[in-house]
Image (cartoon, rainbow, N blue to C red):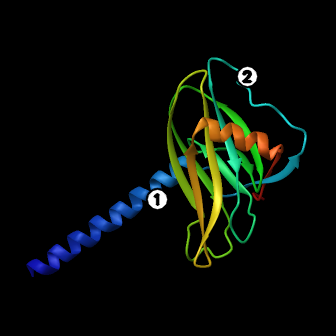
Amino acid sequence: MKSVLVLLFLTATALAQDQSRIATAQAACGPKDVQFDVKNDPTPRPASHADPDKATLYIIGEDTGIAHPTIRVAVDGAWVGATHTHAYFSVPVEPGEHHLCASGVLVNPKYSPGTALAHLTAEAGKAYYFRTRVITINLAEVLDFEAIDSDQGKLLIAFILSASRIRKTSNAA
C-alpha cells in the first residue's frame, strides 16, 4: 500500500511540474490565435537606441533547418513581433525583469514543441540581442532561442541587411 501511495505522490508531483512549466510558457507567450505576416525590407537600418530610458531588444532570425518558419516573439505574454530567415526586428522594453517566448510551427512538431523561452533583466539604455533559429538534429527540427553577444548581434544585423516589417493578423473570428 505504501508503494502505491509513493507512486501516486510521485506522479502527482511530476504532473504538477509539467503544469508549472506549461504555465510558465503560457505566461511568457501571447495568445495562440495571433499570427504575423512578415515581409523583409532590404533597406538597411542601423542599430540604434531610440529611447535612453528603455532597453532595446534585437531579435535576429537565423535558420539552419529544413523549413523556414516565421517565428513569433513575445515579451511578458504579449506578442511584439516576428521574424524569419535572415531578418531581424527591434522592440523597446522597460527596464527590469522580462520573460521572452519564441514560437513557430515546425515541420515535425512531434519532436519539438516549437516554443522556446528566455529570461532577461533589462537595463535602461542597453541593447540586448537574441537569435532565433531552427536546428535540424537527426531530421528533427528544434527551435533555438538564445541571447547572443552584442558584438555578434551587431555583426549579424550588418550582414543580414533586412529588417522585418510586420503586419499583425489574427485567426480569431
> Can you name the residue that lies furthest to the top here?
52
Numbered disc total: 2
* Three-letter code, disc 1: Ile
> Can you name the residue that lies furthest to the left here?
2
In the image, residue 155 above or below residue 26: above
Residue 100, quarter of picture = top right
Expressed as whole percent of the image width and height from the top left, the position of residue 75 reads 59, 41
Expressed as whole percent of the image width and height from the top left, the position of residue 122 reads 53, 30
Expressed as whole percent of the image width and height from the top left, the position of residue 92 reads 67, 30
Closest to the observer, 172 or 161: 161
Q: Residues within 10 Å of mark 2 (few under 14, many from 20)?
A: few
* Drawn side of residue 172 relative to residue 149, left or right: right
How far is mark 1 from mark 2, CA to CA?
A: 35 Å
| Numbered circle sitting on residue 81 | none
Q: Say which quadrant the N terminus sits in.
A: bottom left
* Drawn side of residue 39 relative to residue 72, left or right: right
* Three-letter code, disc 2: Ala
Find numbered disc 1 in the image and state the secondary structure of the residue it sits on.
Answer: helix
Please name the residue shown 42% across and 57% down the image. Answer: 21
Residue 66, quarter of picture = bottom right
| Numbered circle sitting on residue 50 | 2
State whether residue 92 appears in this view.
Answer: yes
Residue 12, quarter of picture = bottom left
Please name the residue shown 74% across and 41% down the image. Answer: 157
State whether residue 31 appears in this view.
Answer: no
Q: Residues within 10 Å of mark 1 (few under 14, many from 20)?
A: few
Find numbered disc 2 in the image and state the secondary structure of the residue it sits on.
Answer: loop
Expressed as whole percent of the image width and height from the top left, the position of residue 55 reads 61, 27
* Drawn side of residue 95 relative to residue 85, left or right: left
Please name the residue shown 52% across and 47% down the image. Answer: 118
| Numbered circle sitting on residue 22 | 1
Q: Earlier in the sequence, mark 1 or mark 2?
A: 1
